[in-house]
Amino acid sequence: MKPRLGVLTSGGDCPGLNAVLRGVALAAEKLNFEVLGFLDGFEGLLPPGNFMVLDRRSTSGIMPRGGTIIGTTNRGHFVAKVGAGDRAVVAENAIEDAKRILQEHRVEALIIVGGDGSMTTALQLQEKGINCIGVPKTIDNDLEATAMTFGFDSAVAAVTDALDRLHTTATSHKRVMVLEVMGRHAGWIALHGGLAGGAHIVLIPEIPFDYDKITEALRTRETKGSIYSLVVVAEGACPRDGQAVMHKIAEGENRFGGIGSVVAAEITARSGKETRCTVLGHLQRGGAPTTLDRILGTRFGVQAVKLASERQFGSMVSYQNYQVRHVPIVDAVNRLRLVPPDSQMVQTARDVEISFGD
Ligand code: F6P
């Protein structure tokens, strides 16, 4: 009987997850493991155990597909994070159930593909004796422990495409077009997408903005003969003397979103310019992964299997200096990588006349 590995995808989905699963299945075959893919995140670990076998047949042709063929959730019994910096304790009985299911199915190690919250859960499973290997995932690209995560490049491509489309209609109507993009705590998607899509104003959580500065930037463009403008706003951006826009969805749980229309209304009120707002939302998370995300996802999946075969449990795959390496999961959780306001990237944006509204 071959030894078995389990794998699950957890938290918000993103393009590139299927590339990871295919990488896991093929690398596992090479190293003589069988792979069970647990369905719908950690929930698949609950009795009676909900899984599918991942092998070359079941993973054939999945690389170009967005989402994850084994499903995911950011809800359920294993949620260990309810906000940035928070850590909730996963119920003892849920962990014991998961442990039993893994033992019953002879799963020696569990590969957990997820973001900061899922790694916080992974850590708790590891502490209770389940062998875990982490694979970092977030379109926001805001994990300190890895220079890059798959999904980010695809999200940036979606923002760039949206800006290209908004550009033509903005020009025809001589309007200001505001595009709200994802990024609760970090503005990487807004910054990279804004730069690639030729935005004129980029508002990110790391640089609080001032409405007067936005109006000033729009006027400056006008004096230089530009009759339209593109504004990118990260969902977590907030004015210098205000708060981020979010709404309560459950006790202790808030969802970001809505800053784009607030900014659009303020621009109209202060400048008289006709302004429209588009919220890109989950279009940034859907669809086929870019080439880069397929490659990164594959590399992460293969590395996770290698780490399992080397019994490097409690470690997370990490991308550093163009190499796929690993770090202890415990060092990876709760460490967000934010856009440094004085970084070269921000300066480059300023050098091509992007205003951050500051
Ligand atoms: O963490 C990625 C992210 O895309 C955030 O930027 C966004 O706020 C959130 O997930 C939305 O998640 P969902 O709508 O799936 O709960």
Image: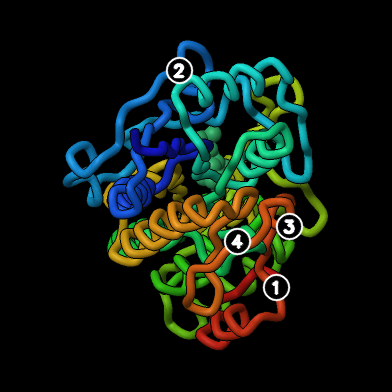
Query: Sequence-wise, which precedes: disc 1 or disc 3?
Result: 3
Measured Cα–Cα span from mark 4 to mark 2: 38 Å
* Amino acid at the residue labelled 3: Asp
User: Which numbered disc covers residue 49?
Assistant: 2
Query: Sequence-wise, which precedes: disc 4 or disc 3?
Result: 4
- Which quadrant would the N terminus be assigned to in this image? top left
Element type at marker 4? Answer: loop
Name the residue at the bottom extreme.
351
Left or right of 124 on screen, residue 258: left
In this rendered view, identify the residue nearer to me: 172 or 208.
Answer: 208
Circle 3 packing at 10 Å, graded few (<14), some (14-19), many (20+), is few
Circle 4 residue: 187
Measured Cα–Cα span from mark 2 to mark 1: 44 Å
State the image coordinates of residue 277 (x, y, percent, origin top left): 46, 48
* Amino acid at the residue labelled 1: Pro
Which residue does the image show at 66% across and 80% down from the upper left?
A: 343
In this rendered view, identify the residue nearer to me: 324 or 293.
Answer: 324
State the image coordinates of residue 52 (x, y, percent, origin top left): 32, 27
* Amino acid at the residue labelled 2: Gly
In this rendered view, identify the residue nearer to me: 204 or 126.
Answer: 126
State the image coordinates of residue 322 (x, y, percent, origin top left): 47, 77
* Foreground: disc 1 or disc 3: 3
Query: Sequence-wise, which precedes: disc 4 or disc 2?
Result: 2
Element type at marker 1? Answer: loop
- Which quadrant would the C terminus be assigned to in this image? bottom right
Measured Cα–Cα span from mark 1 to mark 3: 21 Å
Circle 1 residue: 340
Measured Cα–Cα span from mark 3 to mark 2: 30 Å
Circle 3 residue: 331
Q: Are marks 2 and 1 in contact (CB under 8 Å)?
A: no
